[in-house]
Amino acid sequence: MSNPDRADGVTRLDAVVIGAGVAGLYQLHRLREMGLTVRAYDAASGVGGTWYWNRYPGARFDSQVEVYQYWFSEELYKSWKPSERFPAQPETEQWLNFVADRLDLKKDIQFNTRIASAHYNEDTQRWIITTDKGEQIDAQYLVACCGMLSAPLTDRFPGQSSFNGQIFHTGLWPKEPVDLKGKRVAVVGTGATGIQVIQTIAPEVGSMKIFVRTPQYVVPMKNPKYSQAEWDQWGAQFHELKKRVRGTFAGFHYDFESGPWAGKTPEQRLAVLEKFWEEGSLAMWLATFAEMFFDEAVSHDVSEFVRGKMRERLHHDPALCKLLIPTDYGFGTHRVPLENKYLEVYLQDNVEAVDCRQSPIECVVPEGIRTADGKVHEVDVIILAVGFDAGSGALSRIDLRGRGGRSLRAQWQQEIRTAMGLQVHGYPNLFTTGAPLAPSAALCNMTTCLQQQVDWITDCIDYARKHGKRVVEATQAFEDQWVAHHDETAAATLVVKTYSWYMGSNVEGKPRRLLSYIGGVGNYHRQCDELAASGYPGFAMS
């Protein structure tokens, strides 16, 4: 980047990128390629986004590493050698640093800096952006790559500050090692993150109390090591994989290709389920039968198959089965966690499961956690795996104001709306990745969807500039049309009937709407491509 203009203490840029994770790094690279003066800002001290903050014990992704990749450079893909199919957080953070160093991106990233506000100036048609350090930036374009799970719910229970021991939120885990050996540990939350923590720390803690509210269907992860020869085989498929992930339902290299449920005998259906169960990946969720998302009867049968697998591992213990095996929602309508001997942890003598449906957490006290039955669970360490204000939370925590001083935070407190998760009407030249109403908000292999959005945004800006346009804004009519299509698509599924973060149910007062577009990644990409090929109808340029 050429040096930004500075006048009256204001930094003047063509574009500001918020975030230096998977999307932010690629967006910085693409805008620099166009010759724009651009800088990325991140609250962390290094690159990585979610892979910087989520360094809790056991953190690893559950997309296979061969598709959790950047697709703009075959040479980049082949020159990084992962150690295993599902690498852990430290290796993923190293990979993103490797990418940033290869592309020389860090010189244009300002770390340890949070964007506090961004106000659109209608007179200049530019954004005035302020950091938590007081720096003012004047930029034409603002691209939010804040992440869909980057607003942790930290103050979850009354009395947290009174606790005599240590409290950690998994999404804000310290860099320094946390010693849990021999300690009395409480883990609150049994979603994908809580499961990874629980199975990882179980061998070292003195005792563990696990506070269970919503049980999860789980699938055992198979995580083989990768040799150089095996990685070379994946490298040889680079172009095929790149094309493949863009067209599947969830952006992986597998898809629903087993044929329709109705056309199979019970024995054939069982064979498909057994085959994908043995796969040890999210293919059990995203490559068996799509009907599980729509049809109550199919959902029941697939769910019962998974319940049977879980019962066996819990030794058919009636109390544990009742607490840990879901019965009030179907398999796949929540996020499906992959795990490694998670259920077996509950069979340990030093582990106690606390039923939070029977007796919810009331507050944190100096000695530990008090539940509604009046019992105080005394512990030394509390680990909060209580999740995030997903999709909308990161942007809502910035004071974002568009035309007429309208506040995005206030609008989204009333109703969460976007135009394809790429823009919001009333906020000219604000582009978003990982925002609500796009597959990238939840239902996608993130590298697939985030790169597609970055490419679309970059091409849109390039198109505007080449046509002498300074401002791009989604129209009200187009946003209305997309919201209606999104809702109609969602309403046909069982997902909208569940209580989950997919629906915003985990945040009190959050408007209820499926956060992620569920019409399929391939379908979404096709619609985006058609818009671009037609000159961006629905996006007013002036």
Image (cartoon, rainbow, N blue to C red):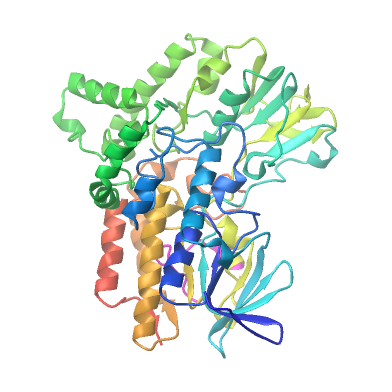
Judge left or right: residue 50 versus residue 210: left
Residue extent of the magenta highlight: 410-426
Judged from this view, the residue extending furthest toward the left is: 263
- Residue 435 seen in this snapshot: no
- Residue 172 seen in this snapshot: yes
Q: Quadrant of residue 135?
A: bottom right
> Horizontal and vertical percent for residue 68?
40, 45
Look at 28% across and 51% down and name the residue there.
Answer: 242
Residue 104 to residue 298: above or below: below
- Secondary structure mostly seen in magenta is loop
Residue 469 or 79: which is nearer the viewer? Answer: 79
Residue 412 to residue 318: above or below: below
Look at 66% across and 29% down and name the residue there.
Answer: 187
Judged from this view, the residue extending furthest toward the bottom is: 123
Q: Quadrant of residue 385?
A: top right
Look at 58% across and 16% down and name the residue there.
Answer: 346
Judge left or right: residue 226 versus residue 120: left
| Membership of 413 in magenta stretch | yes
Look at 67% across and 82% down and name the residue there.
Answer: 10
Q: Quadrant of the C terminus?
A: bottom left
| Membership of 4 in magenta stretch | no
